[in-house]
Amino acid sequence: MTLLEVSGVSVTFDGFRAINNLSIAIGEPELRAVIGPNGAGKTTFMDIVTGKTRPDTGRVLWGELSTDLVKLSESQIAKAGIGRKFQKPTVFEDQTVSANLSMALKNKRGPFAVLSWKATAADKARIVELAEEVGLADRLDHRAGDLSHGQKQWLEIGMLLAQDPRLLLVDEPAAGMTPAEREHTTDLLKRAAQTRAVVVIEHDMEFIRRLDCRVTVLHEGSVLAEGSLDHVTKNQQVIDVYLGR
Ligand SMILES: Nc1ncnc2c1ncn2[C@@H]1O[C@H](COP(=O)(O)OP(=O)(O)OP(=O)(O)O)[C@@H](O)[C@H]1O
C-alpha cells in the first residue's frame, strides 16, 4: 500500500526553486534511501512532509484517506504518525536511558497523561522491549549523557519508535559513527522498516549498500533516478551529477 504520496510539489526560496515538481511515493512497509548532491533538496523534502516548509504547489497525500498533509499543522502531522530524526541527537543527557524512553512513551499519550502518568507493568515491559530493539538493553540505567554518539542516536530512534510512527524520517544517521556503529544502525533501521515506512537521507554509500533497499536520487529538487542501488549507480546522469564528483 502507498502510505505517502508526494505529488507535483514545488518550493521556491527567494526566487530559487529548491524543490521542482517533485513526486515520490513511499509504501508501507518500506525502507527507502534518498541520496543526491548537496543542495539537491533532500532535507527540504523532509521539511515539506513534516509541515515545516509549505510547498507553493503540489500535494502530499497520506494514508488510507489520502489526507493532504499540506493542510495540516506540524503537530497534526506528527500525531498522524510521522516521526523525524534530525542529524544531532536530542536526548535528555541527565536522564537515564530508561527515563528517556519512558518520557517518549508518555508523550505519546498527550499532555494530560504526562501530569498523572505512572509507569505500568506494560509500560516497563515496553521500555525494555524498545531498548532491546535499538541495542541498549544493557544500558537502561546509564545516564544518556554517558552514551557514545552512536548510542545516543539509537536512543533517539528508540524514543521515536516509542511513539509508533507509521513513517520515520531519518536524516544522515551514519554521520560521526564508527564502522561498528554504522553496521548496527543499518540493522536497526532495516528491522524498524519491517513494520513501517522508513526514509533515510544518507551520503555514505557503504551504509546505503547495507540498507539494501530502493534508492531515490534527487537532483535540483526532482527525482533523477530511482531503483536498486546497482540500477541508480549505473545511471550516467547520476554518475555525472553525484557519484563522479
Ligand atoms: N529556508 C531556506 N531559505 C532559502 N534557501 C533554502 C532554505 N532551505 C533550503 N534552501 C536551499 O534549497 C536548496 C536545497 O536545500 P536542502 O537542504 O534541501 O538540500 P540537501 O539535499 O538536503 O543538501 P545537503 O546534502 O547539503 O544537506 C539549497 O540550495 C538550499 O540552500
Image: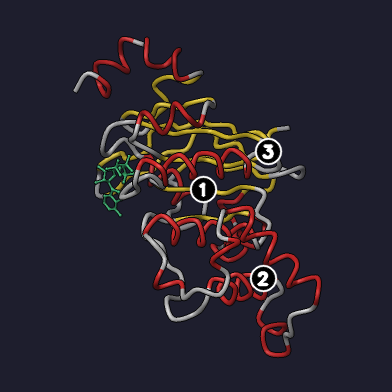
Q: For the residues marked 3 and 1, what is the alpha-carbon distance in whole angstroms? A: 15 Å
On screen, 26 above or below 88?
A: above
Q: In which quadrant is the C terminus drawn?
A: top left
Q: Position of residue 44 (x, y in %)?
A: 38, 46
Pick whichever of labels 1 and 2 is earlier in the sequence. Answer: 2
Return the disc, 3 or 2, that comes first in the chain's sequence.
Answer: 2
Closer to us: mark 1 or mark 2? 2
Can you identify the residue that label 1 sits on? 169
Q: Residue at x 46, y 71 (%)?
A: 144
Residue 40 to residue 74: above or below:
above
Note whether 39 is above or below 14 in the view shown.
Answer: above
* Residue 75 quadrant: bottom right
- Estimate how packed mark 1 is, as few (under 14), some (14 to 19) or many (20 or more) residues with alpha carbons within 10 Å: many
Name the residue type under label 1. Answer: Leu
Q: How many labels, in total? A: 3
- Viewer-proximal residue, 32 or 72? 32
Q: Are marks 3 and 1 in contact (CB under 8 Å)?
A: no
Apparent side of residue 44 relative to residue 15 in the rendered image (left or right): right
Q: Residue furthest front?
A: 138
Residue of label 3? 194
**Residue at the extreme left of the image, as rendered:** 245
Residue type for callout 2? Leu
